[in-house]
Image (spheres, rainbow, N blue to C red):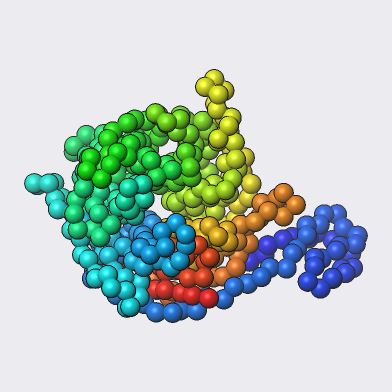
Amino acid sequence: LIRDIILLKSSKLHIKPFKRYSVVPGLFSHPVYEQTRIMYERENSLLLSASASALCNNLAVINRKAGKSGGNATNIAVVHQNNINIIPVTESEKNKPVFLTVHSNGSVLCEVTQVLWCDLGFEVVLVVGSTLGLHIYDRDGVELLFSHPCIDGPEEEYNFVKGIATLNNEVLCVGNSSGVLRVFGVLDEETCLSFMDRKEGHMDAITDIASIDYRLASADDSGVICLWYFNGTELLQIATVDTFGSAVTSLFLWKDWLAAAYGSGHIRIFDSSKINYTYDGSRPVTAVRLLTETAAHARYITAMDVALGVDYLLTASEDSYVKIWRVCKNNNVTEINLLCSSQISDQMLVGGRFLNKNGTGFCVSAYDTNLVHCFKT
């Protein structure tokens, strides 16, 4: 990986150890800073009841003990067709494995398209998207609490729910294959959710959505990203990122950054800092600034996650590599630096998540295998 290119008139190069390279003289120079590498080692493999389906972001984690305060994940969930494997991360966990089946509706076959644990304020629940719509179970995946069709396309077409996120634990947002976003307000444990809003923001199928506080980002199969702000009653579209020619497979919003992973193998980091305050009802933002980008993988990026405590970014790809990056600011310039790269030979990776906020452990799932590979520092 060539990170920086330096064009020289002469070969005179002075090196200052552990600092940066100084170029004298030169046409153009770019500082090359020392990068701290992190070594992860394979810890163990978890056994699923059934193999993982070929779905992007096909791995979810939950921490039952620490909640928002941190700690390690205790359970993971992986989708297989219309089933969900829920297994403990360590053998010491008292939680038993659960094999949840989302049943078909009459002659209509069901396929699960996404699974995610979400905090709805009163309880952490398991949110499931499928070709039948939205399903919400208790955190153990035992009791069905709520369901909604969330389908807008003709019945003869392939319709599905894809993209799940919460806004400040008060609102649940879901996307679908028709490019429509639905907003549900969180009520209480008995009523669970109530419908609030519906927005047609995309011309193509939604691939993923991400949120922080009342900010929301949604992406579709054409590569367009829409940025929204929730004002308490409805979603307001305030910015758009045009396509780069390939699908957006995964999104993540944190701090003032929006990270997007692409089918082309690229990672792009955008400035999301103005989503909060530039909307005044009459002047929507029409462009978002690209801060940095990198060609991260040779194939489709199928999963992305962020360790919020250290700004580490994880990417998994069909090229069989899982990579850990660090996003940081250097003299007000956003950079993304590679910290670790690990290959799982002959495996098409479809899911990857950090196991804690400090980025000291992560796990990945692979298509057509019932093993989840875990790594630690």
In terms of image quadrants, where is residue 21?
bottom right
**Residue 70 visible in the snapshot:** yes
Q: Looking at the picture, does residue 247 appear above or below residue 98?
A: above
- 333 to the left or right of 286: right
Residue at image point 25% right, 54% down: 138
- Give the residue drawn at x 48%, y 42%: 213
Q: Is residue 319 visible?
A: no
Q: How many marks?
A: 0
Left or right of 226 in this view: 163: left
Residue 2 rendering spot, x and y as whole percentages: 67, 64
Using the image as rendered, state which of residue 300 and residue 309 is in the foreground: 309
Specify whether 334 is left or right of 260. Answer: right
Q: Is residue 284 above or below residue 249?
A: above
Quadrant position of residue 366: bottom left
| Res 98 → quadrant | bottom left
Q: Position of residue 250 (x, y in %)?
A: 44, 51
Taking the view exactly as shown, the residue that stands out farthest to the left is: 106
Q: Residue at x 28, y 42 (%)?
A: 188
Which residue sits at x=18%, y=38%?
A: 156
Locate the N terminus and report the quarter of the image it occupies: bottom right
Q: Is residue 11 left or right of residue 246?
A: right
At which x and y percent is residue 27? 85, 54
Name the residue nearer the viewer: 99 or 233.
Answer: 233
| Front-most of residues 26 and 21 | 21
Rendering coords of residue 333 (x, y %): 70, 50
